[in-house]
Amino acid sequence: MSRPPQFLSSVLESLAVVSTTLAILESPVYSQTRVILVDPNLPDITNQGHDRGISYDPSAHASSIDSSRIIRPDYANPAYSRLAAEAQEAWRQGFGGEDVYHESGLVVTAGRAGSQYVEAACRNVQDNPNDGQGAGDAPTRRKDVERLSSPAEIRAAASLPPLEHTHTIDAEEQESPLGSTGYINRTSGWANAEGAMRTVMRRLLSHSSSSSSSSRLTLKRAHVKSLLFAPSEPSSPNNRNQKPTVTGVTLADSTHLTASLTILATGAWTSALLDLRGRIRATGQEVAYLPLTSAEAHSLRHLPVLLNLSTGYFVIPPAKNASSPSSTSTSSPLSPPPAEPSLSTNAK
């Protein structure tokens, strides 16, 4: 194992970087690592004693701040699927706080063009031993995952009523908006990301104290203007392919912060720090929250999440403690094809 970094810089307040920072501070492997978290929206804890609790309002600019984050191991990449399954165990154990994670089940669908991705994701879920049902319990996993081979089966799995009228449009010309193939994974779900962010950030802030010189966490309320790179070495046959090394960041006031390792969680703002042209593009998703009556919310509360990977369309049931919000999303017109799901600012 390589030596843990002595000083680590985390840029931007997001659930990904906050949870990573928290894991580092609470791991004995990194007991000698000091961390600085840089973000213009960090709370001011100067006059907030830990005995009185810490007030925290998440940044509205962070993509982690929403109530519609799908928690799933349903990915075609086996390594990513295993990583997501491990993370889901933490959600089940209360990582995000009380009444934040909801294991409602997930209906994953796609059109004909995305059927290979859905098939690969289904296999990964069935083969994953870390699914909350007990390692090696293959019969239980097969029971919780059911393949769906038609729009009618998809509607039934999503607890949607059958269509009253059959359309005469040629199936080769137009597919169902719900998708033509898929499966339901009853062990996936969704989380209120804003609620989780509040819980995890409070835990993180407990590691920082303005009056303690021994604190391993430093909060820096600032904008990052650019990255710092190590000076390039002269080209030679031995280092011809050597890449520049990031050594820290430059803040808007021209202050330099150096670190052994720098973690960027800058989302849609990454292109302001790195030239990503031709490699990645930021897209957005349109999200609508539908007002519901108490009776409607009660009847929809136990529905599974529906996610169409071909269009990006998804529907999430209302929360247990709310009578109004339900969310849907339309696909981004810039989304890559189904084989390469979009890395959007509201990525699921």
Image (cartoon, rainbow, N blue to C red):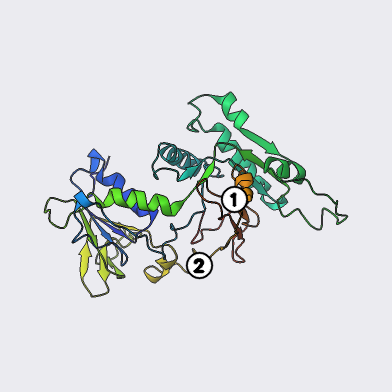
Q: Residue furthest front?
A: 294
Vertical order, 178 against 280 (above or below): above
Q: Quadrant of residue 255?
A: bottom left
Q: Give the residue type at disc 1.
A: Ser
Vertical order, 103 against 167 (above or below): above
User: Is residue 233 something one can see in this rendering?
Assistant: no
Image disc number at residue 38 = none
Dots 2, 1 in contact, CB < 8 A: no
- Distance, label 2 to label 1, CA atoms, is 48 Å
Which residue is located at x 74 percent, y 41 percent?
A: 153
Which residue is located at x 20 percent, y 43 percent?
A: 31
Q: Give the residue type at disc 2.
A: Gly
Q: Which residue is mark 2?
A: 278
Relative to 44, is 293 on the left or the right? Answer: right
Relative to 343, is 117 on the left or the right? Answer: right
Within-10-Å neighbours for mark 1: few <14, some 14–19, many 20+: few
User: Is residue 228 something one can see in this rendering?
Assistant: yes
Q: Quadrant of residue 87?
A: top left
Q: Quadrant of residue 250?
A: bottom left
In percent of width and height, residue 107 lies at: 63, 44
Image disc number at residue 294 = 1
Q: Earlier in the sequence, mark 2 or mark 1?
A: 2
Residues 89 and 272: in front is 89
Which residue is located at x 65 percent, y 54 percent?
A: 310
Q: Nearer the viewer, mark 2 or mark 1?
A: 1
